[in-house]
Image (cartoon, rainbow, N blue to C red):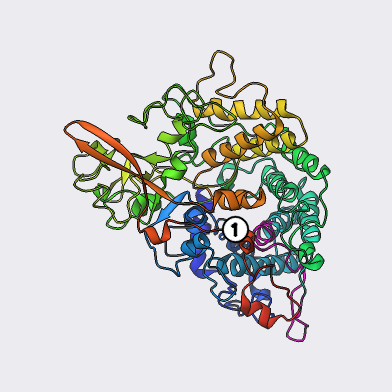
Amino acid sequence: MKKLSFLLALLSILLYSCKNQDLLDPQTSTTLNKESTFADSVLTMRFMYGIYSDVSFTFSYKRYEGIFAGTDEGAGEGWGTLSGPTQPFVMTSLGTMNPTQTTPYIDAWNIAWRNIRRSNVFLGNVKNSPLKPATQELTMAEVRFLRAWYYAILLRNFGGVPLIGDKLFEPSDDLNIPRNTYAECVSYIISELDAIANVLPIEHLPQNYGRITKGACLGLKARVLLYAASPLFNGGGVSGNPELKALTSYPDFNPDRWKQAADAAEAVIKLNKYMLMEDNVTAPGYGFSRVFLTRVNTEYVLPGMLAPNKTLENRLLPPSRGNNTVESMPTQNLAEAFGMIDGKPIVDGGPIAKSPMYAATDPFKNRDPRFNYTFIYNETPWYNNTTGKKDPIFTYDGAARDGYNVVKNSTGYFWRKMMSDNSAQNGGSNTDRCFPLIRYAEILLAYAEAKNEMGDVNTAYEQLKLIRKRAGILPGADGLYGLTAGLSKDDMRKVIQNEYRVEFAYEDHRYFDVRRWKIAPFTQNQTIYAMKITKTGNTYTYAKVVATPSGNANHVFVESNYLFPIPQTEINRDKSLVQNPGY
């Protein structure tokens, strides 16, 4: 573990860098030549760790370098305080993306291609290294996974892309490379994962924690196949042009794709390696909170490695905990997706009846315990460096430091998820966390979703009960953890979709989920709301209000935004590339 963290810290001396260059360009510069790099076992391994170093580059707040905002703000989960019209999350929120304004998506294109090239350099040269044959075989499998991971990022963001295999381009090569179809890209990624799954270990030695395992390989396969089975890609492409449709989805619907996704998720389950991190004894849902604050745990299928840090605490906690500028805050829209501790929602109209426990006059009481570990809300206790103990954070209108009228663009909430209440920007301890790139809860929900779409609603019930039990939701007299008995497939689908929203808030899922489900026109054409609390004496009054500034509060979804555009510079450079529909 320490060894990996050390190696990941050596990014300043990475051997190959394609940044700010055409990533299919054969003339990419190097700081050391291939011969000297792969003649040395330490440099060879360091090169591989360089490919690892970008594995979490799209995750949540990390997606846009320099600002703490990402797809969460574009999906209405978060409210970015940097509200200019060219901010990437504003463009994804307001439907103003275009191929020339690249900030919302350029890193997803450039960094993925950079690492695909790095992977090919490694795979083409590692056999010349002094590494032992067994180590060569293992590292090649790891790098093939990483290459598949970066291709999967491209596929999720852009649809079909050029598949270059193991090719390393030379100056004389023809660089006009057409896009492969969506089906071809899925097939390639799955074939790569299948080829290496049995080479990869179930787990590495403790000092190598964070390196790719068989579970990570099967987990990525499950995710790719789940997306491929989903309405947007399973024959539901948004273009009537046959060529464009083939580039961005399968041409026709095939229900068997749901079975493929279910089988892939089940393969991870059958490894008997992973389990939900559960602790409802310390406090309801406490295990859910510990997942993100425990480096080595039973739930991480693929962790994105980090050294102990206070990165989130430094940028997202309220001013009273040391931050002058809070760059993202959760929305009331997201808060309303969380139900009560009885597992029932706080609103009417869905497949599960509204909870009798909810009271609008005391909206934070008896909520789904995941609510308490996702949001900082009025009177949440948190480490205070001034007093050295946990004091309440006050968010009501008029509160001195963190009040609704004081914090710029306040939503009445601050993020808590993935953060430690023993830490603040101006004091406390570092947090021992990793990025949850793939965790076991995703596998269980993917299995539930795929099985439900196959008509096996009972299996979906069982997976949701596991998720909700770990969350600290009460089982109820019927043992259904708030679920209504006898749900239809359509109603269960709605429940599953909301469970994704609650379980994976602020984890880079929602933006892509609503698109793959093709519900974005209904969920993303929305007004963003805040919670404004006023205090009279010792009494609080709660009001749902439009978030400010109001010009960005009315989110817009346009059909072209199901996928990101391919950068216009790439279209101009490679005349064989075809732009995505609507751009």
- As drawn, which residue projects farthest toward the front? 349
Name the side, left or right, on which 557 lies relative to 136: left
Image coordinates of residue 248 in percent, x first then y, are: 73, 61
Identified at 50% across, 42% down, the residue is: 295
| Quarter location, residue 25 | bottom right
Name the side, left or right, on which 54 lies relative to 118: left
Report the label total.
Answer: 1
Residue 419 versus residue 48 in the image, above or below = above
Quadrant occupied by the C terminus? bottom right
Identify which amino acid the numbered label 1 is placed on: Tyr
Residue 60 versus residue 10 in the image, above or below = above
Name the side, left or right, on which 273 lies relative to 510: right
Name the side, left or right, on which 211 lies relative to 162: left
Q: Nearer the viewer, residue 308 or 189?
A: 189
Image coordinates of residue 199 in percent, x first then y, are: 76, 48
Magenta part of the protein: which range? 149-177
Q: Nearer the viewer, residue 288 or 178?
A: 178
Q: Nearer the viewer, residue 198 or 268?
A: 268
Identified at 69% across, 66% down, the residue is: 122
Can see residue 64? no
Q: Nearer the viewer, residue 327 or 539?
A: 539
- As drawn, which residue projects farthest toward the bottom? 172
Q: What residue did someone put label 1 on?
A: 52
- As drawn, which residue projects farthest toward the top? 477
Identified at 57% across, 60% down, the residue is: 54
Image coordinates of residue 538 in percent, x first then y, are: 19, 31
Q: Is residue 154 magenta?
A: yes
Identified at 62% across, 74% down, the residue is: 567
Indicate the secondary structure of the residue bearing disc 1.
helix
Q: Is residue 557 magenta?
A: no
Image coordinates of residue 527 in percent, x first then y, are: 45, 51
Callout 1 crowding tier (Cα within 10 Å): few <14, some 14–19, many ≥20: many
